[in-house]
Image (cartoon, rainbow, N blue to C red):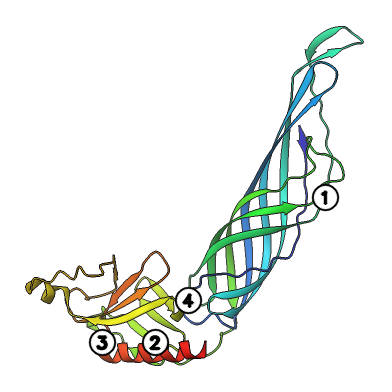
Amino acid sequence: MRHLNSILAGLLLTALATGAGAQSLAGRHQLGLRLGYWTQTASVRVEIVSPEISTSVQGDGYLGGVTYGYWLEEDLALTIDAGALALDTETRVSPWTTSTSSGVVGPTLLVEEREESTFGGRLAAGVDFVMGRHFMTGAAIGYNLMGDFDRPVGGSLNYSGPEMSLAFSFLLGGGRSQEPVYTSPSAGRSLWQEYRVFDDRVEFDTHFGMMTIPFAHIESVTVSESGVDGLLRGDLHLDGFRPALKLDWANFLEHVVLDKSEGCIRRVLFTPDDVEAFRDALEGALARHRDRR
């Protein structure tokens, strides 16, 4: 059995492709902790005259790190990551060897302990969720790239391997201040939820948390009659049908239909205080946003 503790440190520049929060993430700072699990397997076969010795190495362990990030845009962040990897390796050798001095054939167990260190980096992709004004959590899968050790450990010089990790972050700063272009106040028709249009996004302040849709993800915005009225006329609204998330009384009232190009949910139905005024405000903000880009 060989035990190895190695330190993996590096800088990581990443583009985070998702963000959702109670306010714009642009201009905010992020301090985080990353925890995860790492694994690697290597097999080596060595022949020393006779018999042949087979070595199988299984390495796994826990990893952790601290991160600093700065959100350049609502869906883009620059992140610096410094981490450590605790690695435990086990070497299995063919158990039967011959002792020439005694002429006895039997099991032999070799044990060695030592420390090695190397530098490396990490490539990863994941998703982040804003849980409130100051907290964010996320999950990622990635690959740890490590340099070779000076001496083989368990028959292997390199222990690069995949990882899975969770991240917990604290958000600092107020972000780039913005006043909403249009606000649909909390009311009975919206189940006492507030909806807001900004210059670069739509926010839905629901009973289950804040939901934000960046303008870059919006395909179209339309006004539709209630599902009940359509049903009474024999119109089931099957043209262009998509599964939808309904935030309020959209089945029973005239409502806004927002179609998205990304995400698990591609259609959102909701009932602002004035559906046409909300649609016009959102279409105007979308047009200005696309002109700027």
For label 2, the residue is 197
Residue placed at 81% from the left, 29% from the top? 111
Label 3: few (<14), some (14–19) or many (≥20) C-alpha neighbours in 10 Å: some
Q: CA distance from mark 4 to mark 2?
A: 14 Å
Residue sitting at the far top: 103
Label pair 2/3, CB-CB below 8 angstroms: no
Element under label 1?
loop
Quick one: SS at disc 4?
A: loop
Mark closest to the chain's N terminus, 2 or 3 = 2
Position of 259 with respect to 132 (left or right) is left
Q: Earlier in the sequence, mark 1 or mark 3?
A: 1
What distance separates the C-alpha of mark 1 from that of mark 3? Answer: 62 Å
Q: CA distance from mark 2 to mark 3?
A: 13 Å
Circle 2: is it few (<14), some (14-19), or many (20+) Cα within 10 Å? many
Which mark is nearer the camera, 4 or 2? Answer: 2
Q: Nearer the viewer, residue 50 or 6?
A: 50
- Residue denoted by label 4: 21
Disc 4 residue type? Gly
Can residue 152 be seen by looking at this rendering?
A: yes
- Viewer-nearest of labels 4 and 3? 3
Type of the residue with mark 2: Val
Provide the residue designation for mark 3.
Answer: 275
CA–CA distance in space, label 1 to label 4: 40 Å
Which quadrant of the structure image shows residue 33? bottom right
Whether 242 is drawn above or below 224: the answer is above
> Is there a contact, CB below 8 Å, between mark 1 and mark 4?
no
Amino acid carrying label 3: it is Val
* Label 4 or label 2, whichever comes before in sequence order: 4
- x, y percent for residue 45: 76, 28
Q: Is residue 122 above or below residue 189?
A: above
Circle 2: element type: strand
